[in-house]
Amino acid sequence: MFKKILIANRGEIACRVIKTARKMGIATVAIYSDADRHALHVRMADEAVHIGPAPASESYIVIDKVMEAIRQTGAEAVHPGYGFLSENPKFAKALEAEGVAFVGPPVRAIEAMGDKITSKKIAQEANVSTVPGYMGLIEDADEAVKISNEIGYPVMIKASAGGGGKGMRIAWSDEEAREGFQSSKNEAASSFGDDRIFIEKFVTQPRHIEIQVLCDTHGNGVYLNERECSIQRRNQKVVEEAPSPFLDEETRRAMGEQSLALAHAVGYASAGTVEFIVDGDRNFYFLEMNTRLQVEHPVTELITGVDLVEHMIRVAYGEKLALTQEDVKINGWAIENRLYAEDPYRGFLPSIGRLTRYRPPEELDIEGAVVRNDTGVFEGGEISMYYDPMIAKLCTWGQSRAEAIEGMRVALDSFEVEGIGHNLPFLSAVMDHPRFVSGEITTAFIAEEYPEGFEGVTLPHTALRAIAASTAAMHRVAEIRRTRVSGRMDNHERHVGEDWVVTLQGESFDLTIAADRTGASVRFKDGETLRVASDWTPGDALARLDVDGTPLVLKVGKISGGFHIRTRGADLKVHVRTPRQAELAALMPEKLAADTSKMLLCPMPGLIVKVNVAEGDEVQEGQALCTVEAMKMENILRAERKGVVSKVNAGPGDSLAVDDVIMEFE
């Protein structure tokens, strides 16, 4: 077996590979840029080599620099992770020329499947069902519009060398096809150094289901069932699960067999994923093959018990697969939520900054439940603008889908992240959404259920009562602590009343607390009583409570006269007052927010790429005003209403912070 492996990547996937290599007794080498000097993967590896400035184009994807790190350390093999150089045939060839093993597929397979146009032609020849589309190269926007009309709207415009949602646009009209072609071309050139574009039919009401394959260099191969990846935002997967709640055994087998046929057609070896779009009648169409480890691979590992990274390393070493198709089973259910540094309240735009608090839920692996968190960050670390905004992949496993979902709900509520915008509230909302719980989902789920964007969660009345009872009990504990610290009187109980008014989410609850050594009985005005038990102490950022036998996890922050509570996707200001305080508070005027309706504010830290208008221009609703690039993604900002531009404060090349004023209107 290899004695030393270099991981040509960063972040959580580098950490993930290091864990398996360590388990196998293999020494590891990390590479890092200026921005990652103190990164977690650097800390975890046995050795680390600096390879250049922060931008990936000057460090992680510069083949010569990675090759020099290999020579310096004497690494015998390289695991590329995903992204960066993982599907770059030039890198694989360079390794081969150096006599270093590539922990991935042969160059021929990378070249054939890495190009989406070529891969579709090969898939058709291998009798794999494919989506109608135009596989030739498209020269300009006019040709893109013509082809789109021939295929029929809606169409998907894609970068041939694309991945991770970059360089992809859906067009429903000629105007969108023209605009989408140029944006996709720009993103493709920036992200992959390859601006070739192709167009295919966009299947409505689609589900995104993919098959994991694993092949060796001796002609053996297996498919490890499927993953459902239909919860997507801007073509980027957010929630994945295995198995799919939609497939039956017949469809699963057909998809698996076609996936293996495609893999064998290109002489595939290593782990790979064949992605399909599946319609409501379980007709499936080949999208692409990813010749690398997928971000969502943990859910497959959790239901099959197969360590994909270990098998990739063994295949690269020349070993035969140690399992057959008959060995591959489906055990229970697994769900993965991708935690991103992005603000769901601002249209999921990227957020950067320092993680002032980062406390993932405790990982566990016991009979009936698993919590796994693949991450590459730590408390005090910084989320950089140079790389993908993913912070962690939180996974849960249960014996049934319902158990896996419930485990995920608790794990999300227990995840503490502060200092940056993040999508934890949105993930919690999805886990509670009736459509997700039922399994009736499509890739249009986010667009259909959150057409105006995510504005938080409105909790049902029963949930509010449980939170009101809990926070009242917590407030009482805090008040007792405060009177003890003040030392006003020996009998501190005299200073803490029993009657309180709790206000949250526009509702008020009058209640009375009767406390004892094991908890508190909270009686509401209508006579209902809830029993609350917890070991929470003032200052704890997380409260784990039991409310009438049901677990409740609250993220807790202090505000004047109460708490800032986050739970199940809701962000609540909870005020706990005496009856007299509540009476006076009702008379206080509400502070109005500043009027920014005549300003275009920068929604994220980013770089102005293009300004489409000038001072004095009249703009129409929906008109493109400017383009902001952040984390390799182009974001077109549009006019919300008709107006006249009175002032332009920023131009191409300017770096802006959140809420910087880009332009003003009359």
Image (cartoon, rainbow, N blue to C red):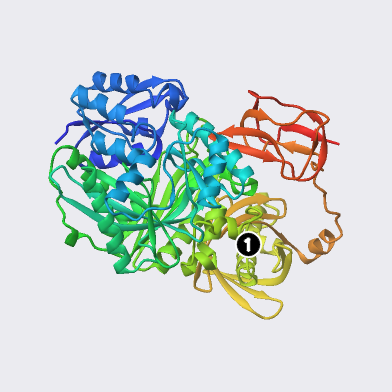
How far across and down, in percent of the image, does residue 459 sit?
Answer: 63, 65
Q: Is residue 479 left or right of residue 233?
A: right
Q: Quadrant of residue 408?
A: bottom left
Question: In this rendering, would 317 be left or right of 394?
Answer: left
Q: Would you say residue 307 is visible in this rendering?
A: no
Q: Position of residue 397 (x, y in %)?
A: 36, 60
* Quarter in which the C terminus is drawn: top right
Residue at the extreme bottom of the image, as rendered: 527
Q: Where is residue 45 in the image (x, y as percent from the top left)?
A: 30, 32
Q: Quadrant of the N terminus?
A: top left
Residue 59 lies in quadrant: top left
- Residue 425 makes an appearance in the image: yes
Q: Which residue is drawn at 60% across and 68% down?
A: 463
Residue 502 vs residue 429, the one in the foreground: 429
- State the residue in front, 441 or 307: 441
Specify the quadrant of the image occupied by residue 481. bottom right
Please tell me how many numbered marks the rendered image carries. Answer: 1
**Residue 633, position in %: x, y?**
54, 36
Q: Which residue is drawn at the image coordinates 67% and 81% (left, top)? A: 527
Residue wearing tag 1 = 471
Q: Eyeballing the image, is 665 above or below 148?
A: above
Query: Identity of the amino acid at label 1?
Result: Thr
Which secondary structure, mark 1? helix
Residue, x 72% and y 51% (percent of image)?
560
Q: How crowded is mark 1: few (under 14 residues within 10 Å), some or many (20 or more)?
A: many
